[in-house]
Amino acid sequence: MTTGGTSFWTSGSVPLIEPEFLSSIIAAASDIALVVSAEGMILSVLLNTQDDSFGNLKHWEGRPVVDFLTDESVEKFQLAHDAYMAGQLPKKPLELNHSDNAVWQYPVRYTFHRFGQENAVLLLGRDLRPIAETQQQLVQAQIALEQGYEARREFDARYRVVMSNVDDAVVFVSVQSGRIEDANKQAAAVLGLKPDALTGVSFASLFSDRSVAELTESLMNATLSDDATPVTVVTSRTRQEVGLYPVLFRASGQRVLMCRLVGSHDKPVVDGASGHPAALFRATTDAIVFMDPRGTTLSVNDAFLDLVGATHLSDVVGQSLAEYLARGQIDLGVLLENAARSGQMRVYATRMVNDLGARVPVEVSATSLEDADNPAVALIIRDVSRMEGVRKAETGGASMPEPGRNVMDLVGSASLKEIVAETTDVVEKMCIETAVNLTRNNRVAAAEMLGLSRQSLYVKLRKYGLLSKNG
């Protein structure tokens, strides 16, 4: 209330305030108070005793006020001070940013008040740092909120693209209410409704043979089953038998069922042996690898993981098969080129290297799978380390090929040195021809395959008249 207040303060009945009381009153009435001379020098600094965030500012006294203002605030203060010296008090508070040796900055809102000492001005200031901090927090919260909205919009866009492009009919059902929260157009086609009409509809009402409680219980039980047996229902509109494959998850504190709808027309009619290839892939003792035309593994069976000593499927899939072949890219190039050229390669002998560095002798057969959309090369890899031991046992430790037995017939008709020299040349020529054919006349790869230098290979090619062959 201000009744009689104006006359009280102007009637002269108020006694003069003692200097020691005046400074404390001014300090309490503001956060910071400056007495500035007509020349812009700071004559006095008063700080609120309840706030020690300003620290000690006694060193301001006797120095120009502009020394403690930021660049953008210097001009603002000078304009306001010139107006004050011209007899015009600023009508609005003046916001200035202080700085002290660039160590800290803080904003203060000042009001100008006339002071009796030679045109000096009293500046009463309010610290704006709490307001600035609050504004900064609000800005950061707004930025975080916008980022959250943007991320949500991005995920929602991805979700919509997936839902509209998958071939499966998918419905999301709330466990608590039993109503559909979302569905794609494939599900709407199966259920005989438009996609927009499905949202909010009771899921059980779309089927003629289940109540809400029965359907929910059946779906929940199916999520706990290990055999992936569908919940079979009959749609009310299309009278189609549909299998429901539910998956339970929690979102925003609510349990939701994602149900995949598989109609009877979606189930392919196949013979009784349709599952045999997959069973063979899983159970065979031979390693089976599917890779793309560049040699990157697409899928492998457990036998291949055992062969290379890999722990998980993810350790192998996506890697180049050359990493597990003894001659690396040379072996892989031979397999890929021959599979691409003739469609298949019956037997290729090499060694596989496992994670521990051990080398296992193997025989590989390759087949090119013609598929315009997803071309691939299939490999069957057989560990022959045990077979080598069996062969040695059957031959008494000496493995003698058929051509070797024919050499025995030469004993007596030629010296041992002549027989060995002749057979060595024959075997050497056959090996070189085989390596050159396998590598499609890539002599660098052939030399590496035979363990020869390029110069030695060229010497032997010239020796056996193979230098110009396929050149």
Image: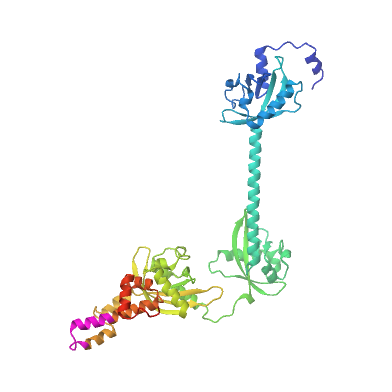
Residue 434 higher or lower than 88, as above or below: below
Q: State the extent of the magenta-drawn residues as a range.
A: 410-425
How many numbered marks appear? 0
Q: Is residue 81 visible?
A: yes
Expressed as whole percent of the image width and height from the top left, the position of residue 363 reads 37, 76
Expressed as whole percent of the image width and height from the top left, the position of residue 245 reads 60, 68
| Residue at x-position 42% and y-position 63% | 311
Question: Going by the image, does 113 lie left or right of 328?
Answer: right
Question: Is 416 a magenta residue?
Answer: yes
Q: Quadrant of residue 438?
A: bottom left
| Residue at x-position 70% and y-position 19% | 121
Expressed as whole percent of the image width and height from the top left, the position of residue 362 reads 36, 73
Residue 180 higher or lower than 282, as above or below: above
Question: Going by the image, does 7 lie left or right of 431?
Answer: right
**Relative to the observer, which residue lies in front, 71 or 55?**
71
The image quadrant where one finds the C terminus is bottom left
| Residue at x-position 18% and y-position 84% | 415
Question: Is 72 a magenta residue?
Answer: no
